[in-house]
Image (cartoon, rainbow, N blue to C red):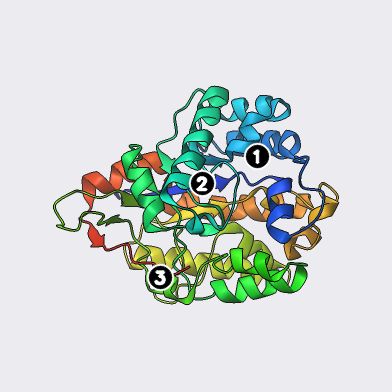
Amino acid sequence: MVMETPKHIASLSLDLDNQWSYMKTHGDPGWEPFPSYLDVVVPRVLSFLKERNLKITFFIVGQDAILEKNHAALSSIASAGHEIGNHSFNHDPWLHLYSEQQINREIALAEEHIEWVTGQNPIGFRGPGYSLSRAVLKVLTCRGYQYDASTLPTFIGPLARAYYFMTAKLSSEEKRQRAKLFGTLKDGFRPIRPYRWNLDDNGKQEGMIEIPVTTLPILKIPFHLSYILYLSLFSQTLAIMYFKTALLLCRFTNTRPSLLLHPLDFLDSRDVPELSFFPAMKLTSEKKLLLVSEVLRLFSNHFTVLPLQQHVHDVRETSGFLVIEPSFQPA
């Protein structure tokens, strides 16, 4: 009798960025009334996950939780058994520019409204646009968060930001605010495996766990779903081969990946014409769903896929941790 090798744990999460937050970051007019597609995308995603028996982590923006028009969609996520994380209140990718007091207010306000709508008090955080600072980590630690998931260890963040700026109409001040959107070159040197932040100058205090959004081992190129969908514009076969290579490298290097989804992975320009500037919005949602389905099938074949909270529990039980000093480039 052949014994199957147990699959390692991996995690899956979705940053529930809304239409208004993309428009705001892009510098587009008309975001102030907070236009929303949550009533469209949330049922679509929940149905997709239910069909595949997947439970994941949804990072919710506090501003969406405060608006009654979004309550039914957001409460349905928790009712379906998914973990709820904090994605800030205002979804400002320049959160790293805030003072510690401003950050505390931002995170606390999001907590309050997210818990009121979903019934869950978030224990995990992801910064908008991967925005992170020592002050953010200090606030999260003081507020009792178990993990942060804001880092994207890749070298290509500046290229993604340059493309984004080319498609946007931003003032010099707005570009300054977004100067770290998608990260800096230095982020490529961060670990792709979970680690602890050292926030104690004496090294005695156990720091919070960081679960990075996993990038390709060794090369540090992204392979989250939005990136795979972008590659599929050139060749779907190439996109799938690239993802298979990423999974094989993760297994070869004993990396337990944390894979990231976004709402636009399930939407197209017919759903949200205002966001047609995103390249993969040229794909129909039907084609996207087929590709996302295949990617998650491969992911589930290689790993036991769980929400981030359970990923954190697993690495606590089975892994030794690097301890990283949270040094950040000046804003």
Give the mark, 2 or 3, whose residue is nearer the N terminus: 2
> Helix or strand or loop: what does disc 3 sit on?
loop
Pointer 3 residue = 217
2 and 3 marks in contact (CB < 8 Å): no
Residue 213 horizontal/vertical position (percent): 46, 58
x 57%, y 75%: residue: 158
Query: Mark 3 belongs to which amino acid?
Result: Pro
Question: What whole-number distance in Å separates the C-alpha atoms at marks 3 and 1?
Answer: 28 Å
Pointer 2 residue = 13
Foreground residue among 96 and 197: 96
Circle 2 crowding by C-alpha within 10 Å: few under 14, some 14–19, many from 20 = many
Circle 1 crowding by C-alpha within 10 Å: few under 14, some 14–19, many from 20 = some
Circle 3 crowding by C-alpha within 10 Å: few under 14, some 14–19, many from 20 = many
x 61%, y 44%: residue: 16
x 62%, y 64%: residue: 228
> 192 left or right of 114?
left
Pointer 1 residue = 45
> Helix or strand or loop: what does disc 1 sit on?
helix
Residue 322 in sight: yes
